[in-house]
Image (spheres, rainbow, N blue to C red):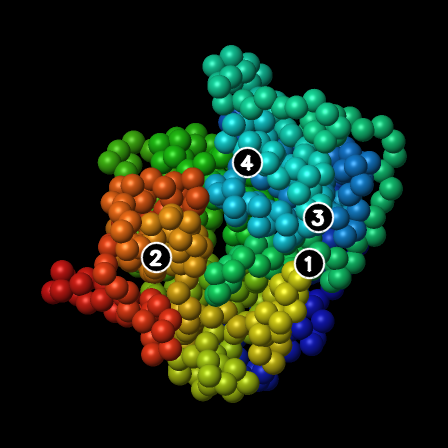
Amino acid sequence: MTDQSAPEAAVAPAMGVADHPWNDHYAPGVDWRSPVRQDALPALLAETVARRPDASAVDFFDKKLTYGQLGGLVDKAALGFQKLGVKKGVHVGIMMPNCPFYVVTFFGILKAGGTVVNFNPLYAEREIAFQVADSEISMMVTLDLVQLYPKVAPHLGTGKLEKVVVGRMADQLPFVKGALFKLLKRQDVSPLPVDDRHITFKTLAEADGTFEPVEIDPHADIAVLQYTGGTTGTPKGAVLTHANLSANINQLHRWIPGLGDGEHKILCVLPLFHVFAMTVGMGLSVSVGAELILLPKFEINELLKTIDKKRPTMMPGVPTLYTAINNHPKIQDFDLTSIEYCVSGGAPLPAEVREQFEKLTNCRLVEGYGLSETSPVATTNPIGGKIKAGSTGIPMPHTVVEVRDPDDPTKLLPQGESGEVCIRGPQVMQGYWKKPEESANAFADGAFRTGDVGFIDDEGYVFLIDRLKDLILCGGFNVYPRQVEEAFYLHPAVAEAIVIGVEHPYRGQAPKGYVVLKEGESVDEAGLLAFLEDKLSKIEQPVGVEFRDSLPKTSVGKLSRKDLAREEAAKAQTATG
């Protein structure tokens, strides 16, 4: 077991420690200078299993696993994966919603020495095909649901993908609910072929033999390839080591007072395949020995009932989640006062949403900021310290935020001046998988270039004001215009297409398409939107299509999103003016 601070070169600030403007603004007990632990992720689970074997680890629709039981299942899964050939350098995909199998699979793969590749179950087939090929997974783990397995099956035998491990949803539920699921939800269960390319999760966990311990180097061994479009829209796998992820977990542990002291419960309705929930929900819960309450999808009534009944003390979320709770017509029927801390990320958190949610729950809701490339948390408003409306907070321990000139990234800008926000710290990725040029371009003097424009005030609080690129922040998820545009171009009638983000009352932003049709071709808005339904995930679906005779172009003939964005901004200003 190791307890190392990050290598000095990895977190060395561009200015002296004493000069950091945020040093004096942490909550009591939080020190920027204190070492950040970087260890193998299975070691964090093993420590908690040894320390709290009888404590509840996971609660899934009232079926609970203690930490002792979770540790035992992970050990069995690790042996099973090892028998199937998982070792260092082997990539294994996980495509499933929040459930106990996800937690067991995640840590089982890592304990066997493998690398986890998260897949969004809402991906369209072409998005899955790209990631299967690019990530070089040799195995996928999923569930026997019609919403999942049929998405995986067509890719078996492509690239390196040769095996699928399939868990039964009914096996994860309490006995009565599992029996009812088998009886009443037969139409939701996918039939599975019987061959050597398909392995049930039960068979995996019953493998014979002795597990061969794997020595994990936290700084060198890749724990997760977390796919993101970055600021270009081209999906890339952010290489996150065990050290990156465990460092961020440790930073969060120290940020939140009282975690690990007593009985804490973390409710996670955000998907674990998203880096935010993976770290702030699952990783933090396992590290401190909290109970992880899992919901497989966001349904407002189910969420409120769960909070009222299960009494969680912490809940990571995105602004749309807190807005939905605030606006529920029968919110007074639910007791939400068990919640002590909430961290919001993924999109800007309006001050009125924060204030209303805090009144409902009497909790502390703080806004943070991060990216897949930073494991993900880089800054957060301090819990127990000053919260600034509109700010994403101050840097996590051993994290330095810099503002650089976007046109000359080697140039640091003075405090208070706006420029590109750059981050250095132990949670920052190693680079992008198989993309050396893009990896090199992602850093400036060792600091990760976020693609966001912002500034740091005189107390060290970070404020974001714009994007360097055209990323659409949609309900806490990243939507990349280029991906949506490519789907538009699959329609035979489309000649040109531009997609930009427009304001949306619930999701904050949503994609809208602008299209020029080929001469002699015709399709209406309803027909085009229907065409896109199986080619994009739900969150990527455009809220509308505007047909035009021509689209704005730059001086070199490129389609211009900026001109359309200006038009939409002018429309919005006219409508509110």
What residue did someone put label 2 on?
495
| Apparent side of residue 568 relative to residue 493 in the rendered image (left or right) | left
Residues packed near mark 4 inside 10 Å, few (<14), some (14 to 19) or many (20 plus): some
Name the quadrant containing residue 400: bottom right
Q: Secondary structure at mark 1?
A: strand
Q: Position of residue 505 (x, y in %)?
A: 26, 51
* Residue under the point 79% across and 37% down: 84
How far, Cα to Cα, is label 1 from label 4? 28 Å
| Separation of marks 1 and 3 at Cα, in angstroms | 13 Å
Question: Would residue 201 be found to the left or right of residue 382 on screen?
Answer: right
Sequence order check, earlier mark of 1 and 4 = 4
**Could one spot residue 158 in this view of the protein?**
yes
Foreground: disc 2 or disc 3: 2
Check disc 4 and report the residue beneath it.
151
| Farthest residue, direction front | 520
Query: Which is more foreground, mark 4 or mark 3?
Result: 4
Q: Which numbered disc, 2 or 1, marks the residue that appears first in the sequence?
A: 1
Q: CA distance from mark 2 to mark 4?
A: 29 Å
Identify the residue position indicated by label 1 in the image. Answer: 241
Instruction: Select label 1 or label 4 by which is in front.
Output: 4
Confirm or deny contact between disc 2 and disc 4 (CB under 8 A).
Answer: no
Tell me the residue at 27%/51% (across/down).
520
Which amino acid type is marked by label 1? Thr
Measured Cα–Cα span from mark 2 to mark 1: 43 Å
Residue identified by numbered label 3? 91
Marks 2/3: CA–CA distance:
39 Å
Q: Residue at x 71, y 48 (%)?
A: 91
- Quadrant where the N terminus lies? bottom right
Q: Earlier in the sequence, mark 1 or mark 3?
A: 3
The tag earlier along the polypeptide, 2 or 3, is: 3
Label 3's element?
A: strand
